[in-house]
Amino acid sequence: MHCLKASIFHHLRLHEEAEAAEMGSFATASIPILSFLLLSSSHCLETKTNKISKNQAMILPLRTQQLSPPLPLSRPSNKLFFHHNISLTVSLSVGTPPQNVSMVLDTGSELSWLLCNSSSDHSFHPLSSSSFSFVPCSSPTCQTYLPCDPSSRCQISLSYADGSSSDGLLAADLFLLPAHKVAAFGCITTSFSSSASDPTAIGLLGMNQGPLSFITQTSIRRFSYCIPAAADAAGVLVLGDANLVFLPHLNYTPLFEISLPLPYFDRVAYSVQLEGIRVAGELLPIPKSVLVPDHTGAGQTIVDSGTQFTFLLGPAYSALKTEFLRRTKGLLKELGEPDFVYQGAFDACFLLPAWRSAPPDGIPSVALVLPGAEVVVGGERLLYRVAGERRGGDAIWCLTFGNADLVPIEAYVIGHHHQQDLWVEYDLDRSRVGFGPVRCELASQRISAGL
């Protein structure tokens, strides 16, 4: 998904009308933000792949990138307008001969895509790759879910929570992993962006559990990453099991699954169960019913590397905001402007002297409690300085937990800002996600020294 890439979710929308028909009365118009691709595996593209084993694990640098301001494009009136200013990027080699491409790592999206523009240096050049091909309309995927243009190619349309959209054609090419893998992706020719743009990335690497995701097509059953806290520092992405001896002990939480299709439940996301929220070690009085999906599927908790910050549904957010304000009274000065809502979802904001580069000490930590694991957020990760906003000699800082009801989205989202300096592992064979604290920049250095 982009940050509220606004990655919030970049969820792929490949003609959900077909999916809506399968679900009966469920209509995509009722879901302004989340859109899902629930394909049967029998409709996947047929590619010859082998699982990546331990001794074939691929280790790649992962970087946090400060984004450039968006282009001055006019915004369609029906598009939500969100922002984001940090993305996670990884470099891969695609095509024959290989072309190095930088892609945004997104565990909340399914179909990967690359900008395809032969007239631009900042794009993938399909005509320069002898292994590139467009996917024909005769493929099962196109026949079932995608429309075909007169040239008999599969059209794709992607839309994201930040109002961004892209259009192009479904294509396939070789990705250089330990063994060459053929994977389908969107060859994007036209796009609209309402958010900041990554000056280096020319595509997106979709890593959720859907049949068209990169990991599904390449049969990767385990992957992990470590996101550095420092801007532009090096982290790491591991595809496969690298068996790194210096890794911390990981606490695992099971993936939460619902077998029936529900209108607001994304079955291909990395969904976990939120059991509670602690502030300074004390559990907030949030009813359990607020933290579990309801009969429509709304209320799932998703781990998403494509969303920048973390979002909580209204009742949970209100409880956290109230307690955080109580515990920081006298330590943080509230902004006191009810109409100021950063990124449309962050309304717990404070004034700090503009000379400060970090929040003061003593701010209480916030922990997201999961079965078998906790994601603890403390220190500088709790507050985020709003660029360009000053009140006299003070800068504005906002709590990095947002109110999902203001967006609106019908899910809890654990964004990548709160995954910094954690080793996060996705183990699909055991249906679990693991978390362990580690200095990601140092881990990246140790890995580089050992290669």
Image: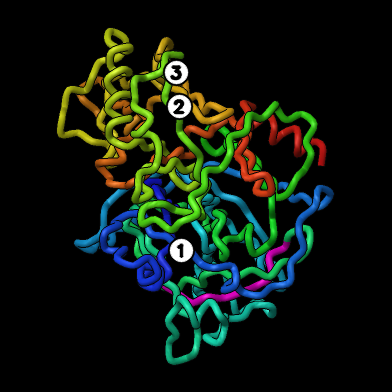
Neighbours of disc 3 within 10 Å: few (<14), some (14-19), many (20+):
some
Amino acid type at mark 1 = Leu
Q: Alpha-carbon distance for marks 3 and 1?
A: 36 Å
Neighbours of disc 1 within 10 Å: few (<14), some (14-19), many (20+):
many
Q: Is residue 201 above or below residue 131?
A: above
x and y percent of residue 332 in the render?
A: 30, 14
- The label number, if any, that marks residue 164 in the structure image: none
The residue that label 1 is drawn on is 37
Residue at horizontal 68 percent and vertical 65 percent from the top: 175
Q: Residue 7 vs residue 240: left or right? A: left
Residue at horizontal 28 percent and vertical 45 percent from the top: 407
Q: Quadrant of the C terminus?
A: top right
Residue 167 belongs to the span the image colors magenta: yes
x and y percent of residue 25 in the render?
A: 29, 65
**Viewer-side label of 2, 1:** 1
* Mark found first going from the N terminus, 2 or 1: 1
**What range is drawn magenta here?**
166-176
Total residue callouts? 3
Q: Secondary structure at mark 1?
A: loop
- Would you identify the image quadrant in which residue 63 lies? top right
**Could one spot residue 178 in this view of the protein?**
yes
Q: Main secondary structure of the magenta part?
A: strand
The residue that label 3 is drawn on is 365
The residue that label 2 is drawn on is 381
Amino acid type at mark 2 = Arg
Residue at horizontal 35 percent and vertical 35 percent from the top: 312
Residue 160 belongs to the span the image colors magenta: no
Residue at horizontal 34 percent and vertical 34 percent from the top: 290
Q: Residue 367 vs residue 105: left or right? A: left
* Mark found first going from the N terminus, 3 or 1: 1
